[in-house]
Image (cartoon, rainbow, N blue to C red):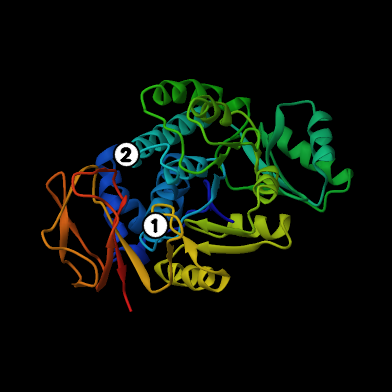
Amino acid sequence: MLAFTFPGQGSQKPGMGSSWVDHASWELVEEASQACGRDVEQLLLGAEAEELKQTRNSQLTTFVLSMVVLDAVERTGVAPNLAAGHSLGEYSALCAGGALSFEDAVRLVAERGEAMQIAADEQVGTMAAILGLDDDLVVAACARVDGDVWVANYNAPGQVVIAGAPSAVEDAGKKAKELGAKRAMALPVGGAFHTPFMAPARDRLRKALGEVDVRAPAVPVIANVDATARDGADEWPQLLASQLCSPVQWRQSLYQLSEMGCTTFVELGPGTVLTGMAKRTLKDATTLSVGTPKDVDTLLAAVTDLGSVELATAGAGEHLYVTERLVVSPCAGIFTPKEGLGGDQPVAVGDVLGWVAEEEVRSPFSGVMMDLMALDGERVTARQPIAWLRTK
């Protein structure tokens, strides 16, 4: 079984979108800019490290680039059995599962980042990684400090992040070293995330969550708050709000994915932080990271070596191989195929295969038509597979 995982704040870096500019999936960046009223392309291509480090910018850029990567992977037909995301990445996982529309998710992430930025500006806080100490002893170190400090992330065995008031975090780091920690490492962040310091942001986010439609995800998504897989819609607004003030149970989430049968973990988005955590937590797992267009080819080669990947959108028994691609819908609406379009027909880059709500469905690939995956008159969603091509 295959799990898609999505990174959180801290994985961003200057120019991280540059390798995607000429890829068909880059069109999501303009959609994101329109949805949130910000120039996301400028942030992905031209922002310096200090600008990107701001919470309102790091969250938005990390989410949008993760969705660009996901879109590129979805076009190949590779689909997960389960999904999870670290903190901010939970929004990416829910969007990947169809629980949130892309536009709603962009607006929520922008609101979340802004709310957390304001909360951090109002209540000074920081975070530190405690390395080489058991979870219980890290909790004990925090409890032995006369100040506001809590565990914020359970990332991997021997890797726990604490957060709170700067002086209390420093004191807890010293206590942790007295208890046997190898290192207490300050993190370059501007707030105490996943602690009670984020309560004002949680209250603001709850209002935004109440204004969007959350659907049941197509694949189960593991929640940060309790490391439990959920395939329904009702609990997610509360889980997303609670997440801001609760520790991220990431190590426990990886164990849960493994217990549910996942053996291959693919990180989609900037950086390789989650890949490293998976390697450290699950010694026998296959781990991959996809952050550039070249990595998509590496993923396809890897899943081909592991065996063909069953199409989540195709009929039972259908599989997609490394030489095949999907053409996806540009928007939501009624699909009308081009007259006479059928199997074994040659397709060139840019050919019109049909229309969705009067928008042209053009192929970004050249190849041979294998089959249509949407029926004439069927209502489809944005980025739903429309046609299946053989490219070699």
| Depth order, front residue of 134/381 | 381
Residue type at tag 1:
Glu
Which residue ends up furthest to the right in the rendered image?
Answer: 179
Q: Quadrant of the N terminus?
A: bottom right
- Residue bearing the label numbered 1: 74
Rendering coords of residue 387 (x, y %) = 27, 60
Q: What residue appears at the point 54 percent right and 41 percent down from the top-left corner?
A: 220
| Depth order, front residue of 296/186 | 296
Which residue ends up furthest to the bottom in the rendered image?
Answer: 392
Q: Which mark is residue 61?
A: none
CB under 8 Å between discs 2 and 1: no
Locate residue 68 relative to residue 289 in the image: left or right.
left
Q: What residue appears at the point 57 percent right and 31 percent down from the top-left corner?
A: 243
Locate residue 133 relative to residue 162 in the image: left or right.
right
Residue at disc 2, secondary structure: helix
**Where on the picture, by quarter, is residue 163?**
top right
Rendering coords of residue 368 (x, y %) = 25, 73
Rendering coords of residue 281 (x, y %) = 72, 54
Q: Looking at the image, is mark 2 or mark 1 earlier in the sequence? A: 1
Residue type at tag 2:
Glu
- Residue bearing the label numbered 2: 103
Kindly tell me whether residue 15 is visible in this rendering.
no
Q: What residue appears at the point 46 percent right and 60 percent down from the top-left corner?
A: 317
Q: Quadrant of the C terminus?
A: bottom left
Alpha-carbon neighbours of circle 2 within 10 Å: few (<14), some, or many (≥20)?
A: some
The vertical placement of 392 against 240, above or below, is below
Q: What residue appears at the point 22 percent right and 64 percent down from the top-left corner?
A: 363
Rendering coords of residue 351 (x, y %) = 15, 66
Alpha-carbon neighbours of circle 1 within 10 Å: few (<14), some, or many (≥20)?
A: many
CA gap, disc 2 and disc 1: 18 Å
Q: Nearer the viewer, mark 2 or mark 1?
A: 1
